Image: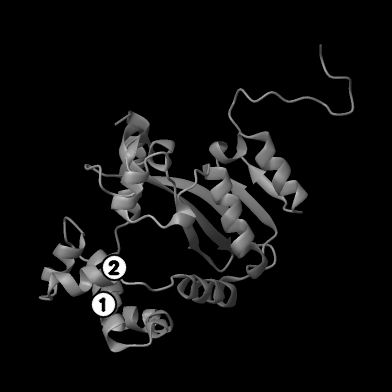
Amino acid sequence: MEARYAIRKRQLLDECQVSPEIFEHVIPRLYSFMKPFVTIFQGQVGDQHAKTYVCGLLSNLERKNVESIAYRFDHSRLPLQAFIGWEEWDDEPLRLALRHQVKTHLGQGDGVLVCDPSGFPQSGRQSVGVARQWCGRLGKVDNCQVAMYLGYVSRKGHTLVDQRLFLPKEWTKDKARLDKAGVPNAYRAYRTRHQLALEMLAKNGAGLPHGWMSGDDEMGRPYWFRRRLATWGERYLLAVPSNTALRDLETEPPE
């Protein structure tokens, strides 16, 4: 890991230190937060599986897969595996419930929508979208999955709103691999990270009061992306690489 990433990692870990009092009654508080989401499943079984899975993700398990989570809470693996892996349920109502909460509790007219990619290391080949690509958490190119995230920021707070998993071209060209991983047909076409960001903006932008769109230099690099935001009437503040060429539009372009 490069020195600058190691330094930043230590800073982030220091910021994660919290007092023990914060964890008092944490499970009841977590269930209270989850209530408007789990009721969407309209059944006690789905309700319990959702709570078990979320509690497992927040636990001290080293490997947070379905099997480990199920055994952590003394549950059978297969029912939880079915709920997460192959039972059909629509996640759109969950995203809609989250968007409504964000608008109600954090929404302000001058809020900011933030698009940012994030990678998470994976050691195998089976996880959807895994490939050798840039992983910001490691500060290098390595085997990982990458997702595009949409966040919302206002003076009242900040939170994640939506996400899209990025599929590299090596995945979208391999039908057998897509079939084996169970990737739905609607998500098999190759889409750049900027196209994924625009999808999330189109899905959530109208429902979240905001005055600005922001992102890092990866988001600000393509000219067409900035023009698309302008066409949609979005004010934006995007970083650009240090070697980006600029010119005055009111003067003649150079030869």
Q: How many marks?
A: 2
Q: Residue at x 14, y 63 (%)?
A: 68
Q: Report the Cα–Cα distance between label 1 and label 2.
A: 9 Å
Q: Quadrant of residue 102?
A: bottom right
Q: Is residue 3 shown to the viewer in this render? A: yes
Give how far across and how far down residue 245 sits, in percent.
69, 23
Spot occupied by residue 65 in the image (x, y as percentages of width and height):
20, 60
Give the residue pinned by disc 2. Answer: 84
- Quadrant in which the N terminus appears: top left
Q: Residue at x 11, y 69 (%)?
A: 71
Q: Label 2 sits on what residue type?
A: Ile
Mark 2: which secondary structure? helix
Marks 1 and 2 in Cβ contact (< 8 Å) = yes
Quarter residue 30 falls in: bottom left
Q: Earlier in the sequence, mark 1 or mark 2?
A: 1
Tag 1 residue: 49
Q: Residue at x 13, y 76 (%)?
A: 75
Residue 200: x %, y % from top left: 57, 57
In this view, 238 is above or below 185: above
The secondary element bearing badge 1 is classed as: helix
In depth, the one of 137 and 168 nearer the eye is 168
In the rendered image, the vertical position of residue 242 relative to residue 133, given as above or below: above
Q: Is residue 116 left or right of residue 232?
A: left
Tag 2: Cα neighbours inside 10 Å, few (<14), some, or many (≥20)?
some
